[in-house]
Image (tube, coloured by chain):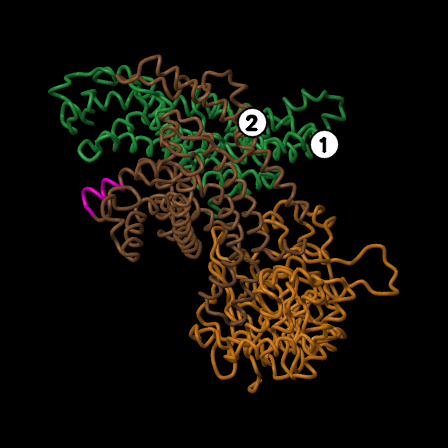
Amino acid sequence: MRRYLAARLLQSLIVVVLVTTISFFLIRLAPGDPFSFTDFTMNNVVREQLRTQYGYDQPLPKQFIRFLGNVAHGRLGYSHSMQRNVGTVLAEAVPRTLLLMSAAIFAAFALGIAIGALQAVRHGSWLDRATSAVLMFFYSIPDFWLALMALLAFAYWIPLFPSGGMTDAVLHDYMSLGGRIRDVLAHLVLPALTLALLSAAGIARYQRSALLDVLPQDFVRTARAKGLAERTVVMKHALRNALLPIITLVGLSLPSLVGGAFFVEKVFAWPGMGYVAASAINARDYDLVTGTVIVGGIMVALGSLLADLLYAVADPRLRSR
Amino acid sequence: MADALLTIENLRTYFYGEAGVARAVDGVTFSVGAGETVGLVGESGSGKSVTALSVLRLVRPPGRLEAGSRIAFEGRDLATLGDRELRSIRGARIAMVFQEPMTALNPVFTVGDQIAEVVRIHAKASRHDAWQRAVEMLQIVGIPAPAQRAKEYPHQLSGGMRQRVVIAMALVMNPALVIADEPTTALDVTIQAQIIELLQELQHRFGMSILLITHDLGVIAETVSRVLVMYGGEIVEEAAVKTLFASAHHPYTEGLLAAMPKLGENRERLRTIPGTVPPPTKWPHGCRFHDRCPYAWERCLSEHPPLYQIESGHVSRCHLAEEPERRNHPHEPLVMHEVGGLGMERGGSGTGRGPRENSADRSARS
Amino acid sequence: MPSPTRVSAPADRLAASLVAPAMAADAPSLVTRRRLTGTMWWSLALIFLLCIIAIFAQQLAPYPPNAQLDIIGLKSRPPSGAHPLGTDQYSRDLLSRMLFGARISLSVAMLAVLLSATVGTAYGLISGYRGGRVDAVMMRLVAVLALWSPVPLSALILVIGLTGWFEVSRLVRAEVLSVMQREYVVAARGLGASGPRIVWRHILPNVLNPVIVSATLGVGNVIILEAGLSYLGIGARAPTASWGSIFFDGSDAFQTTWWIALFPGLAIILTVLAFNVFGTALRDTLDPHQLAGDRAR
């Protein structure tokens, strides 16, 4: 077990290094640099000066070496678009994305499992088929579109929820603790639900087939023969077994805890990792982009590691190995 | 039979599928007395397992019990009983032991939990008490170090031990009747003997009735007092065990007995019953065994035989009861003559093949 | 920063690759067995229709897609008789833009999927056939790369194609392994057929089924991906009309000009739905053992 863990850690490290390197070069190879925008206040002399200041006039390999050196010292660089250290920016952004994604994933699974299980139990009925059709529809919706439509519908046309951001721009700091929590929650609902709805579609499909596989098995019949109520048979005995493949899904979604909300964050202006990354790309803020890639990569790797552990915990058959 | 523990009357369990209606159990009547061990014998496809499942209404759609079926138990008719009451009987008054112990146990719960669960739902016991009882049962069924074993998962136990756990689970509430559906088929021969012994011991100790479903005549000979032979969804013979082995009446039973390999007998090939079990969607007209029977005559093709009384306690669904001299004129069963005809009509999917069927005979047919 | 996919898509694909070996001996070849169901018919018809629309966008569109018709009079008009889908903030006819956008969205998606399917198939074939060390190394590489696909910044088709082949190669390799056990491959080897010949003539035709299914379902994902990237300004850039870039235009003042954002989304949903339904139906027909997803019918 320990050897496996060590191997996985090493693998993850390699991935992070690989990915960082690739994106380092990729973004710098894209046309334009942070200071190539046309602006009346900027003339070429100032442009060149800034470039030299940030070291963008050096040949790429040299830039890379310097970059590696910085990272080794824990310095992720300076973000000129945010006027702050990259580390600081990310330290603020990551928890916000985690909050959004955790809420979304939780809701997605709750919804997905419930719908899928219901479908499996009512297998073949019109409810089952209608639900499948609806789910297929949701599965085909792009997240950025649904986000915008949700915003339109429930923040503008029917002003139920705030129209973006994570907190009320003006009043938040003046609120009590309870008020602040409720403020964040209010801003959380729409983006989280948007994400949840889309993921729930796939989860439900998966859960349905997993439960359909379990229901005809012998131990389910044994449970009935013991005199258990049908609800208990399904929810306690069958579902517990059908959840195992779902754990795989949970595991697979852990890596996306950091990056999965990309478009939704952008549309709702939720100031998390995705939002930061998007603006960074736009502004050609190299250091910030690379920073997000590194941090993102680490979190993804951690996420998948966690996923494996989770599965081992859930299935007692794996534990004895 | 008036004071029998379980009385089944005209049980019919049909399955409704695309291929038609499968009449898996088609009018079965028998009873089990208190403390009695009754054996239900037949090949795969005879309907014996479905009969067992029907008692506790464990048959799932598209199968269902037909109207007119009656299952009398402790003053109630299980066939029409309400759900709640039925559930109070399952696991508590009537318990089942299934064939495959590995798949019959839930892999994600400990064996102790699974036994204790029965106690908790029926006796409303506390977790602690239920657990104690579970450990107690594990000991009774002969599992060493029961307190430790109770905390283990099914995959950590051997096949024989798992079956003991299943038995423990069935007996924990001291039921009046245990229905054992092929309890030893999936086990090694040596373990089989142990399990059979265990069942006998437990019956001796607790006095419950056992309905033992099996295709293994050897097991029947050792354990039951009365035997029911099933074929084509019906009972074709019923007798005390000694009577059955000494003087079986129905040609099918004869075939089954003859097919058993005997020690000391010098044969090159096993005796088989030619042909295969017909599909339950198309039972043959007249006597359902007629095309495989060495004595069949015109009457058997058209007239469905009722259960004739041979002697007290011995019945047989065969016209030979009325015309016993026909037994002196055996011939090749009809099925052997088919190249197109009956063989094709059968469908011959092979699902009804018993364990002693000889495939060479089948290919000779088609 | 991983590409913006949803939880379920990679899960489905991963599960499919895990279960592919179970897609056993009797999987009928796409060529020989054709039992198209009703669902398959209408989804296929829809796909066909969309392709026709894309091809004949030039003929069907009332206006050129980038023509600014009347920057004063026709700026940001809601849907009307003359402009059934309205106009955008540059007074371009939305219907025309959508029709041309179909070209980009569909072609990008199909080409990208074709590329990833080709690369993935080749990779999987080689890996599975060679087996041993070569196989182990190749698969390890894929596992490492696939853990994390960075968002492509340019050369859309190429990059999507290049990152999509991981799953395909896994699928193919699993299929290859199972196919290699079958008698006709062993027989071919026994008769002295060379490696490449065996791979090309015997193994390849039989491993294509899961690839085709995966590709069909993949098109939907890629369409969304492309649209998303165009929305970011990374893919098709102004003034090119792609469904994603139209959406980008629409997200500007979406409270007032909501139709500009609405229609591209609907188009995407329709197209992706068609591909998904077709792909799912295809999978159900081809595979008696079922890949992950809808089980019993």
Q: Secondary structure at mark 1?
A: helix
Q: Secondary structure at mark 2?
A: helix
Q: Is residue B318 visible?
A: no
The residue that disc 2 covers is C120
What is the chain letter for disc 1?
Answer: C
The residue most toward the bottom is B3
| Residue under pointer 1 | C132
* Chain that is coloured orange in the picture: B
For residue C39, above or below residue C240: below
> Which region is colored magenta?
A150-159
Q: Specify few, some or many for label 2: CA neighbours under 10 Å numbering under 14, 14-19, or 20 or more.
A: many
Q: Which colour is chain A painted?
A: brown
Task: In the displayed orientation, state which residue is furthest to the left.
Answer: C73
Q: x and y percent of residue C190 in the render?
A: 76, 26
Q: Amino acid at mark 1?
A: Gly
Query: Looking at the picture, which amino acid does disc 2 mark?
Result: Gly
Residues at discs 1 and 2 both on one chain = yes
Question: Residue A100, can we see it?
Answer: yes
Nearer-the-camera pick, B192 or A29: A29
Q: CA distance from mark 1 to mark 2?
A: 19 Å
Residue B323 x, y percent position in the rendering? 67, 71
From this view, report whether residue B204 is shown above or below residue B236.
Answer: below
